[in-house]
Amino acid sequence: MINVLDQLIQHTHWLVLTGAGVSAESGVPTYRDRHGVWQRKPPVKHQEFIEHHSARQRFWSRNMVGWRFMASAKPNVAHNTLADLEAIGYVGCLVTQNVDGLHQRAGSQKVIDLHGRVDTVTCMSCQLKFPRQPLQQWLEENNPDYAALSGAIAPDGDADIDELDYSAMQIPDCEYCGGILKPDAVFYGDSVPVHRLADAEREMRNAQGLVVVGSSLTTYSGYRFCLWAQQQNKPIVIINQGTTRADTIATQCTDEICSQVLANWLKRVN
């Protein structure tokens, strides 16, 4: 850890990229294990959700169960420490692959939600945006049998309850136009919005280096930040429990617990 901390205190205005490992201590599980291997059932994909009523039934039945936990999850030491590091200038921008909103709840100000958020939904027809929380009451009132279920929670607020028959699940439509409501998160099979990606790339150009926290970088969505930093000859520091896709191009790596490394970074600069 010492070499990593020595590297971190050499610069200010880092761009920090966070993944599911940051929220693990808040009880939100990760998608992959230490070796980057997928460890849960496949999520509903974007095209499935848009094209098939049954896929939306599957999604909302699982999401209704998972949302109860996501709504009550609290920021942990890692989230709080990153907010403190931003306040004193060591974190210039935070880009998160997570959709839980915990960085903002911890007090981070400059956050790019690369994959969106699950606490709002948008009508795919009229583009009106709605808060997620009021939908929970509608879902539970209209699906009392499903509302009583429980299941293993996933990082996107989903829950693993796939053995059920979803055919009777009542799902919400837009109250204004009757269109499909979809959480404002990038589903698998969809792409990060171009404008959001451009904002993130600009922040990488403005940063003095890249810190990856709690991500295996298995998907290109996160790995590209390391390629950008490498192209710009900027240091790359990886803090992750397990191997990552960018270990071979990183300046420094550590598999220590994220919150401990971040807390020691804050202690050193204070």
Image (cartoon, grey):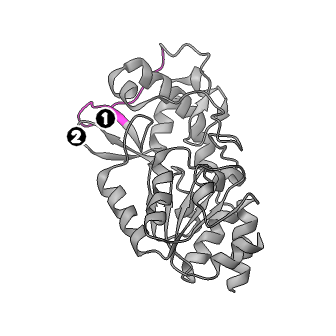
- Which image quadrant is residue 269 in? bottom right
Instruction: Residue 59: give x, y in percent of width and height.
Output: 48, 28
Is there a contact, CB below 8 Å, between mark 1 and mark 2? yes
- Residue 268's x, y, as percent? 72, 82
Which range is magenta? 168-181
Q: Nearer the viewer, mark 1 or mark 2?
A: 2
Q: For this rendering, which residue is in front, 159 or 111?
A: 111
Location of the N terminus by quadrant is bottom right
Q: Earlier in the sequence, mark 1 or mark 2?
A: 2
Q: Mark 1: give few (<14), some (14-19) or many (20+) Cα within 10 Å.
A: many
Give the crowd class for mark 2: few <14, some 14-19, many >=20 residues within 10 Å.
Answer: some
How many numbered callouts? 2
Element marked by disc 1: loop
Q: Which residue is the site of mark 1? A: 174
Residue drawn at the location 62% of the way across and 34% of the way down: 38
Foreground residue among 104 and 179: 104
Residue type marked 2:
Cys
